[in-house]
Image (cartoon, rainbow, N blue to C red):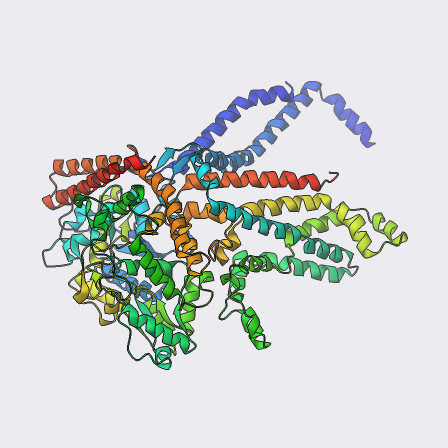
């Protein structure tokens, strides 16, 4: 019996009421399946968010001291020259965070064009391997490499007879920010690379065949075909870099604690110091206000950036 | 019914469910000590006989796993205890204290009422949890004799420094209580001297161990000229320590210029500085403070290159690799150095004495106590729910601080024994203020310009100090910047202290209730006096705050 006839038979046997009943039941079931996820999202994502917004209007130590101060926390932060210094540092890191997305894109495109499947697999493994090494371990290794007395860089300069070029690295106010940027060398982000690779693999191969017929060079292909077609993926990664760049502070906390002086202080670390910082005083209200300001900054920068990176999807 | 209709119908039960879930989560998140404010019993057990017909599992948490000498010394004491009390099992838990992980764990454990029974805490940490009512007040128990000591003295009197060593602890917290049992002699007796590398000193022709600051700086110069790094410094802890030890030796009665005589009480050091900041008596060019900072700047030329980017572990490495001649560190690391400083001949010298050569405010003497007990082993207030368990917990602490066990512990750790009947091991004497010159009663004690900012949470103070020491800003700009930067935080703190609900008035009310309860329960006079003195101190504190209320606006 043909499939169409079978389905017609089934339809005949089911009344409209049955269908409605079944779909209602399905809807309710679906709703209940989604409910735990929804509940946990509300509790663990939205509740802290709104709680943070609420407490940004208070002096709050997380326990017994809770006093309404209105916009006092925001005024204090915005009048603090150190906060603006940290924003300046953050913009430096953000700029380089975005600029250094390029090596990942190039590496992915090159990887995509490797015809030998075994070689491609090998390089994919090489790309993914750093993902399994904890970030903290990598940071501590770099911290040791930058050690002016025993670290790799100064030892290496000594060995090759360039003692004059030895540096204080993280102890030098002018160098510290560059040291933190260089720390991610060769700046290939595994997760981003996989997103780009997924994007490239989903494209119709006829595009490259057409480019070959037109005699497009690899650079032209990259600039005119691959880069524009990866705009959607670039957009996703840019949002990630902006969010991480504006609010992140892990490397600064572990490597330099924002120093020397304020040379590598970023707003995220400024916020951390207010909440759990080096003074033993906890001002979660002020820290919440910093968090809210960072959210607004990240939001504005994202909108501004998205204006320039338009994609069709 | 279509989907929209069904959605509408489902909306209210879903909303109710969400509200319930959210409410439960928020209750979970906000449960604080407020709910747990049971009035603690002030009737102390006169002799802690622990029940022998019941088994007990006691959890003790500290961060000493990173310090095997300390860990093993404590293990030995716990083992001794379990030998004489076979029905008690002590679970010794190591929780690393790196990047504040210890405190973050405790935050959640206390909220969930799952914290260990006995918890080691530093001063700031213990203060926080006391103010949140998570820790048990020990005043009454300290007034009873320690059953493991036979002298008939109260437990507190067996502690080195007696009740006087707890004044800072009592005056610092909102309830005016003793919340910790000192176990390492830290606080009242200990100070942080310099470990030194004998080989480097010899190679640099430093023949005598420096005793005064002048001799110390001369030695540093010789070491530097000989091509070695004189001092292994870090960008945070070291700065704090070194400045504290200058301040402890300076300006006997200096603070009297700021307040009326009735407020001249070492327990009110902080409030005196705050009030002087607020009424403008402490200015950016505060003379004693300028001296403290100039001495520090002069000293900083002998720290390793790149110290501003170094943390305490890196400073420690520099000394342990035999690169730096001096490292400031405490007695708690001595066991570690004993086991790990192989091939280096080292010693410990007392912190050098400042004289008039350095500053006219230098006294050439030390205070009786450089610091005061502010931390130690604390007791989770939840233990109070089980009277028998509480007896065991207190019994363990008394056993720990008894003369017999303290002798074993102090030798193994090694540390300064907290029990005054126990002789201080010779190797620990460099970690104590020398008795013959410990004559100061009321020195400046704190960093006049810097400390009030740090206490009120100004995290910019240390980075600014680094900038000054590295020559990025002049002394004048630095002091002005710090002064201006500290003021808003101090004002904010003052408002909080004067607040009826969360400030000193509410502390006074809580303390008054404790005194009344103690009287009603016919507690011993010693207990009542102890609580009354905390109350009097709080009243004085409030009076001092009120005297500067006009300057807060």
**Residue A198: image x %, image y %?**
72, 49
Nearer the observer, B458 or B123: B458
Nearer the observer, B79 or B257: B257
Q: Does residue B53 show up?
A: no
Q: Does residue A2 show up?
A: yes
Residue drawn 50% across the image and 71% down it:
A150
Q: How many tags in the picture?
A: 0
Q: Is residue B30 left or right of residue A293?
A: left
**Residue A156: image x %, image y %?**
57, 73
Q: Is residue B46 left or right of residue B433?
A: left
Quadrant of the snapshot with the C terminus of chain A: top right
Splitting the image into 4 quarters, where does residue B291 fall? bottom left
Nearer the observer, B428 or B451: B451
Nearer the observer, A22 or B72: B72
**Residue A266: image x %, image y %?**
51, 49
Residue drawn 57% across the image and 47% down it:
A244
Residue drawn 31% across the image and 64% down it:
B332
**Residue B292: image x %, image y %?**
32, 59
Quadrant of the snapshot with the N terminus of chain A: top right
In the figure, A73 relative to B315: above or below?
Answer: above
Residue drawn 51% across the image and 52% down it:
A250
């Amino acid at each position: 019996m043909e499939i169409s006839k079978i389905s017609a038979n089934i339809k005949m046997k089911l009344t409209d009421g049955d269908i409605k009943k079944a779909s209602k039941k399905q809807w309710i079931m679906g709703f209940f399946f989604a409910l735990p996820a929804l509940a946990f999202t509300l509790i663990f994502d939205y509740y802290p968010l709104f709680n943070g917004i609420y407490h940004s209007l208070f002096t709050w130590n997380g326990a017994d001291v809770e006093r309404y101060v209105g916009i006092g926390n925001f005024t204090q932060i915005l009048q603090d020259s150190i906060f603006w210094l940290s924003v300046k540092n953050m913009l430096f890191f953000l700029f380089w965070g975005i600029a250094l997305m390029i090596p990942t894109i190039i590496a992915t495109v090159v990887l995509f064009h490797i015809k030998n499947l075994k070689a491609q697999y090998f390089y994919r493994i090489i790309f993914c391997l750093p993902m399994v090494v904890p970030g903290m371990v990598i940071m501590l290794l770099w911290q040791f490499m930058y050690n002016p007395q025993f670290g790799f860089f100064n030892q290496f300069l000594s060995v090759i007879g360039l003692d004059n070029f030895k540096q204080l690295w993280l102890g030098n106010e002018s160098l510290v920010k560059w040291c933190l940027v260089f720390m991610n060398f060769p700046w290939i982000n595994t997760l981003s690379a996989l997103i780009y690779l997924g994007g490239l693999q989903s494209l119709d191969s006829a595009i490259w065949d057409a480019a070959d017929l037109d005699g497009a060079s690899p650079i032209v292909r990259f600039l005119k075909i691959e880069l524009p077609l990866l705009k959607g993926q670039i957009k996703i990664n840019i949002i990630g870099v902006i969010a991480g760049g504006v609010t992140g502070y892990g490397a600064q906390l572990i490597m330099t604690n924002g120093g020397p002086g304020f040379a590598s202080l970023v707003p995220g670390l400024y916020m951390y110091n207010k909440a759990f910082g080096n003074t033993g005083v906890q001002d979660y209200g002020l820290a919440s206000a910093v968090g809210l300001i960072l959210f607004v900054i990240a939001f504005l920068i994202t909108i501004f950036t998205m204006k320039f990176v338009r994609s069709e999807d | 019914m279509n989907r929209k209709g069904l959605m509408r119908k489902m909306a209210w039960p879903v909303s109710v469910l969400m509200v319930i879930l959210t409410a439960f989560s928020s209750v979970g998140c906000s449960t604080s000590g407020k709910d747990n404010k049971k009035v603690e019993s002030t009737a102390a057990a006169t002799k802690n006989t622990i029940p022998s017909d019941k088994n007990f599992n006691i959890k003790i948490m500290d961060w000493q796993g990173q310090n095997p000498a300390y860990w093993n010394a404590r293990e030995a004491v716990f083992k001794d205890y379990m030998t004489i009390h076979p029905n008690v099992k002590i679970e010794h838990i190591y929780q690393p204290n790196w990047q504040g992980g210890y405190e973050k764990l405790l935050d959640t454990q206390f909220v969930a009422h799952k914290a260990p029974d006995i918890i080691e805490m530093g001063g700031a940490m213990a203060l926080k949890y006391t103010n949140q009512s998570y820790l048990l007040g020990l005043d009454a128990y300290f007034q009873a004799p320690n059953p493991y000591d036979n002298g008939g003295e109260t437990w507190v009197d067996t502690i080195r420094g007696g009740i006087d060593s707890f004044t800072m602890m009592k005056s610092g917290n909102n309830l005016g209580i003793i919340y910790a049992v000192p176990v390492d002699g830290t606080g009242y007796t200990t100070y942080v001297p310099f470990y030194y590398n004998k080989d480097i000193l010899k190679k640099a022709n430093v023949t005598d161990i420096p005793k005064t600051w002048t001799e110390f700086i001369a030695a540093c110069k010789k070491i530097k000229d000989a091509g070695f790094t004189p001092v292994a410094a870090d960008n945070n802890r070291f700065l704090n320590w070194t400045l504290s030890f200058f301040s402890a030796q300076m300006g006997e009665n200096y603070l009297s210029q700021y307040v009326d005589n009735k407020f001249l009480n070492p327990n009110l050091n902080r409030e005196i500085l705050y009030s002087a900041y607020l009424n403008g008596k402490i200015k950016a060019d505060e003379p004693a403070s300028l001296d403290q900072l100039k001495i520090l700047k002069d000293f900083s030329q002998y720290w390793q290159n790149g110290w501003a980017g170094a943390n305490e572990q890196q400073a420690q490495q520099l000394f342990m690799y035999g690169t730096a001649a001096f490292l400031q560190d405490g007695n708690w690391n001595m066991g570690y150095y004993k086991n790990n400083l192989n091939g280096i001949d080292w010693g410990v010298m007392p912190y050098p004495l400042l004289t008039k050569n350095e500053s006219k405010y230098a006294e050439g003497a030390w205070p009786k106590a450089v610091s005061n007990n502010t931390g130690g082993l604390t007791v989770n207030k939840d233990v109070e729910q089980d009277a028998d368990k509480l007896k065991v917990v207190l019994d363990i602490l008394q056993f720990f601080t008894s003369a017999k066990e303290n002798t074993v512990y102090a030798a193994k750790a090694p540390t300064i024994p907290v029990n005054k009947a126990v002789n201080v091991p010779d190797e620990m004497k460099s970690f104590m203020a020398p008795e013959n010159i410990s004559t100061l009663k009321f020195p400046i004690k704190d960093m006049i310009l810097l400390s009030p900012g740090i206490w009120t949470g100004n995290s910019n103070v240390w980075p600014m100090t680094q900038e000054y020491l590295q020559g990025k800003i002049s002394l004048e700009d630095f002091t002005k910047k710090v002064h201006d930067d500290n003021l808003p935080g101090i004002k904010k703190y003052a408002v909080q202290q004067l607040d009826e609900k969360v400030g000193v008035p509410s502390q006074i009310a809580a303390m008054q209730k404790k005194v009344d309860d103690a009287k009603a329960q016919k507690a011993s006079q010693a207990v009542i006096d102890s609580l009354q003195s905390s109350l009097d101190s709080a009243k004085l504190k409030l009076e001092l705050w009120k005297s500067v209320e006009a300057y807060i606006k």
